[in-house]
Image (spheres, coloured by chain):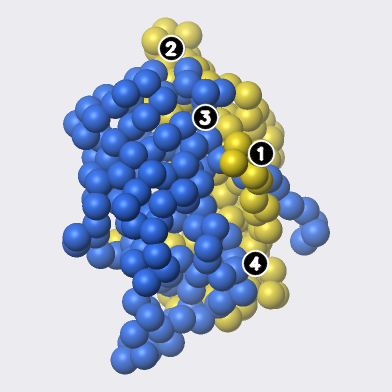
Chain colours: A yellow, B blue
Amino acid sequence: MAEQQYSIHPIGWVESSLAAADQAPDQEDHAGAPAAWLVFAPSVRAGLRDLRIGQEILLLTWFDRARRDVFVVHPHGDPANPETGVFSTRSPNRPNPIALHRVKITATDGLRVQVAALEALDATPIVDIKPVK
Amino acid sequence: MAEQQYSIHPIGWVESSLAAADQAPDQEDHAGAPAAWLVFAPSVRAGLRDLRIGQEILLLTWFDRARRDVFVVHPHGDPANPETGVFSTRSPNRPNPIALHRVKITATDGLRVQVAALEALDATPIVDIKPVK
């Protein structure tokens, strides 16, 4: 069973002014994060039909620039924070680097959806969107 | 860019009494869901070190028995519910069938972690664990 793998097919990509690794995402601190556009593949258009301005959504992205071989981290990359098992942190570096963002829709334009305050680098693949419960 | 894929390597598997598709997961209704064990791969042991009984966690699983070609659904599979874009629902059938469960840790035993009320079938692959913010 341990050899089984599954394929993520991105449903879209992030368009953001965050381009550099030193503007790295920190899922626990949205302060200062820019608005971003989510640009979806035409193949998933029907799935987007009920997204509306003002809704809060859970956005799942794939941190394609993360390290996948990290199991213990200093939270927020700060050596002053004690070493912590990665599954007790929101570090982007983890075996399956899926990030979970709660964001608000601020505009829609066909296959493009704008959200406020997204901590994800430009061109980050989008995995899924779910409603906030 | 649309051809790019990413590989999920499961970090573990669910051990549950839910075995049949007609007991299918419904992420919006935990009522009656059984306790389950999360059984992790030895390779991720270090990442588990700070998980504790009583903690609430976000568990990400891969619904390996889901359909990935569904973009519009009747929520909860009920024809009485109007058709809805899949990204506005918690349907297990979606392009990247990742499920998000908020669950409480009720026991730990090395590579095994027990959680309460999990709506996931037996042998469902585990993708990630994150702390609840």
> Mark 1 or 2 closer to N-term?
1
In the image, which is nearer the foreground, mark 4 or mark 1?
Answer: 1
Image quadrant where one finds the N terminus of chain B: bottom right
Question: Which residue appears at 34% of the width and 67% of the height?
Answer: B23
Q: Of marks 4 and 1, which one's residue comes earlier in the chain?
A: 1
Tag 3 subunit: B
Compute the Cα span from label 1 to label 2. Answer: 29 Å
Q: CA distance from mark 4 to mark 1?
A: 31 Å
Q: Secondary structure at mark 3?
A: loop
Q: Which residue in the structure is indicated by mark 1? A: A3
Residue B41, numbered circle: 3
| Mark found first going from the N terminus, 4 or 2 | 4
Q: Are marks 3 and 2 in contact (CB under 8 Å)?
A: no
Same subunit, tags 4 and 1: yes
On the same chain, marks 1 and 3? The answer is no
Work out whether disc 3 and disc 2 sit on a shared chain.
no
Q: Position of residue A65 (x, y in %)?
A: 68, 35
Residue at x 50% of width, y 69% of height: B93
Residue B3 found in image quarter: bottom right
Residue that numbered label 4 is attached to: A40
- On screen, residue B69 versus residue A59, left or right, reads right
- Report x, y in % for residue B72: 51, 81
Disc 2 target residue = A83
Q: Residues within 10 Å of mark 2 (few under 14, many from 20)?
A: some
